[in-house]
Image: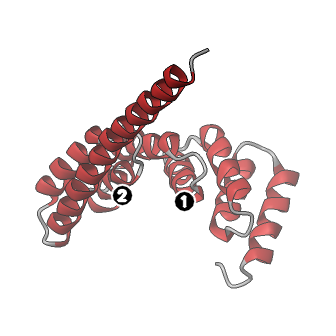
Amino acid sequence: MNSRLIGGSLILVFVGLAVGLGACNQKRVRAVSLMNEGLKAQEHGQRGLAVDYLTQAMEKDATYAKPAFYLAQIHHRGINSVEEAIPYYRKATNRDPSNAKYAYHLGTALLETNSPDQAIPYLKQAVNAKTQFAKAWLRFGQSQESTGQFESAANSFMRSIRANPELT
């Protein structure tokens, strides 16, 4: 095969990758900018504007989990609507499955809606991702206890205590 053809093809592949990565980076940069505007609006008590900016940020970059998490927090803690928060927690967790905090908050929200059976896999995901996450072990134990898994719950409670003896 002609080495010029191979070299030219490789250059085109690298240029194509660079252009593709540039487009992805531009989306992330724009999403971060929108998210920051949303967080500023939230700090100034402009919840509606914050939700608008964070929604735009979430839609701008479909791989970025933070805007979805912040939207969930606004609904869960700010508006006091755990039901409206769950889809955003789920989106954040799906976008970044290795993030223990996202899985923990989703599991906790599900537990708060009396869905311990649905909470268990997310709380397990949280403790697997961060083995010393005391609050996650506690909630995991509560969800196990609620579903009749008493021995597992006792083990989870002990793991919570070992991770943080002062957690109440």
Q: Residue at x 39, y 53 (%)?
A: 69
Which secondary structure lies at badge 1? Answer: helix
Q: Please state the horizontal and vertical placement of residue 56, each as a whole percent of the image.
A: 21, 44
User: Label 1 amino acid?
Assistant: Lys
Task: Identify the residue at the far top of this view.
Answer: 1
Q: Please state the horizontal and vertical placement of residue 112, each as a whole percent of the image.
A: 50, 51
Which secondary structure lies at badge 2? Answer: helix
Q: Please say if 59 is above or below 137.
A: above
Q: Nearer the viewer, residue 16 or 127?
A: 16
Q: Is residue 151 left or right of residue 29?
A: right
Q: Residue at x 68, y 85 (%)?
A: 166
Q: Please state the horizontal and vertical placement of residue 24, each as a whole percent of the image.
A: 35, 41
Q: Which residue in the structure is indicated by mark 1?
A: 101
Numbered-mark total: 2
Q: Which residue in the structure is indicated by mark 2?
A: 73
Q: Is residue 41 left or right of residue 85?
A: left
Q: Please say if 73 is above or below 111.
A: below
Q: Residue at x 61, y 14 (%)?
A: 1
Q: Is residue 105 left or right of residue 145?
A: left
Q: Residue at x 73, y 70 (%)?
A: 132
Whole-angstrom CA distance, mark 1 to mark 2, is: 12 Å
User: Label 2 amino acid?
Assistant: Gln
